[in-house]
Amino acid sequence: MNQQQAAQDWFCELRDRICAAFEELEDALTGPFNDMPPARFTRKTWDRDAAHDGDLSGGGGVMSIMHGRVFEKVGVNISAVHGVFSPEFRTKIPGAEEDGKYWAAGISLVAHMRNPLVPSVHMNTRHIVTTKSWFGGGMDLTPSILFEEDNAHFHGTLKNICDRFDPEYHAKFQKWCAEYFFLPHRNEERGIGGIFYDYIDSGDWEKDFAFTKDVGAGFLDAFIPLVQRRMNLDFTPEDKEKQLIKRGRYAEFNLLYDRGTTFGLKTGGNVEAILMSLPPEARWP
Amino acid sequence: MNQQQAAQDWFCELRDRICAAFEELEDALTGPFNDMPPARFTRKTWDRDAAHDGDLSGGGGVMSIMHGRVFEKVGVNISAVHGVFSPEFRTKIPGAEEDGKYWAAGISLVAHMRNPLVPSVHMNTRHIVTTKSWFGGGMDLTPSILFEEDNAHFHGTLKNICDRFDPEYHAKFQKWCAEYFFLPHRNEERGIGGIFYDYIDSGDWEKDFAFTKDVGAGFLDAFIPLVQRRMNLDFTPEDKEKQLIKRGRYAEFNLLYDRGTTFGLKTGGNVEAILMSLPPEARWP
């Protein structure tokens, strides 16, 4: 329980740090859209609807959402839920085979940016406990216009984090990410990838937790400089159109393939929190 | 083969009638957007990629698409394909159990309108032949702002068509439509419904074909008056916002639940033709 509380506290702390950093960016804008006021996050709590998983389920979450001049739409969700998996799910979740009990907490973030030269970004990390316990998460970038410098900074930052823990992590988790965020019907990746990991249980809980903390904190190092570098640049209507089309592909991925989205919607998850990832505006011309 | 050719010819003829009627509406506009030029359909043919279903598959289709001042984006697809279902699909398709052979032709249409007071519309009819043969199809309306008069006209027209063939058809097919075009995660219907039918094989092919022809021709009677009645009306920015949000729900339905979309994308259908149904612009604010 101390471990679970520690993980949950960290996700809260990380949420606070991210929201503060994003609000600073709202204040710092001098380029396009600076006639709009800098925005602030608003929070909304939700309680788990126990009806879907039986009497033992519960918990809930807090959505932090901001519609700003740098962040056209950004959602940062934290949640901590527990319950009992239905018999059909038990065989699919490690350690849930016997009694189906689970506890899960995490943070999940998707940001769609107003300036099309700033990439969209997604990050989430989570801790799950059944009779086993593990960490999962990752982050990935979806530019509509690619700057090689941004690409190198994002992947380089993630590699540095991974290398501090295991020399094999980065290559493995980058590959996992590229395979996961892929649209088979378009034969294209959703963006330029990043890292994705799951079922991390090295036997050293403190080390695994430290990795997930470093991934979370490292998100700011990986992403904030890209926003600072691009948010004040002028862009063309063609740049915006490219972004809106790329966002259409993003919506396609999330609704057609994303496990969190399709699983969540089909098992009675919080619809508003799950669909917060969808872009504020998208085009399929 | 005469029956199959007759069905295929009809879908072509219906496509021509619909495209002509829609182009007339482009010409007739006097209200908002009349500073834009009236648009015309362009056509694009595609050939089936035989690789997905083995050597015997083939056929193709023709997409007709128009980006206009009344029709912001409209696609009218006809196709005729044949092949052999893989063993796993054979048990799911009537009459395909033994050798898996099938032939299918149809017409499919989705229109997203520029004026938010004109509803979006979807129509498709098809003829499928295995060792059995049947017709399927239907149409449904998705207004973002509902006019009771339009609702009554649309459903009334469909009821008249159905009643000429079987007094039980309309109630049955309207219910089927409402159940099919439903977003469980939102607990709401996609629009105001219409009719949806499948596996129509009364034993009288000529009668079943006549029903599908009347549904197709009746689409123009059901929909054109609504466009004429609403397309010249002024609307507010709030009306447009409502439309864009409703279109987001439309994209959600098609990508999460629509059988044609998810089945088509996962079995190597023509991606451009399948995703022509997605709205030109949508919002998730």
Image: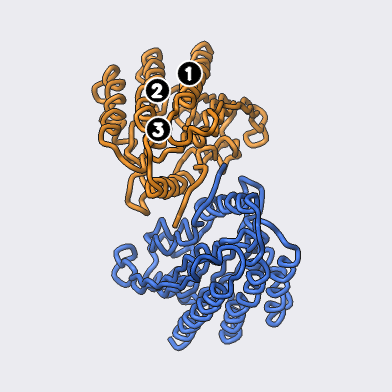
Chain colours: A blue, B orange
User: Which chain does the residue under circle 3 lie in?
Assistant: B
Q: Is residue B185 above or below residue A52?
A: above
| Amino acid type, residue under disc 2 in the picture | Leu
Front residue (pair B67, B265): B67
Q: Quadrant of the C terminus of chain A?
A: top right
Q: Residue furthest top?
A: B2
Q: Is residue B110 above or below residue A185?
A: above
Label 2 vs 1, first from the N-terminus:
1
Structural crowding at the residue carrying mark 1, measured as other residues with C-alpha within 10 Å and reported as few (<14), some (14–19) or many (≥20):
few
Secondary structure beneath label 3 = loop
> Label 3 near label 2: C-beta < 8 Å?
no
The residue that label 3 is drawn on is B231
Q: Is residue B127 visible?
A: no
Front residue (pair A262, A38): A38
User: Which chain does the residue under circle 2 lie in?
Assistant: B
| Amino acid type, residue under disc 3 in the picture | Met
Marks 2 & 3 on one chain:
yes
The residue that label 1 is drawn on is B17
Q: Residue at x 52, y 11 (%)?
A: B2
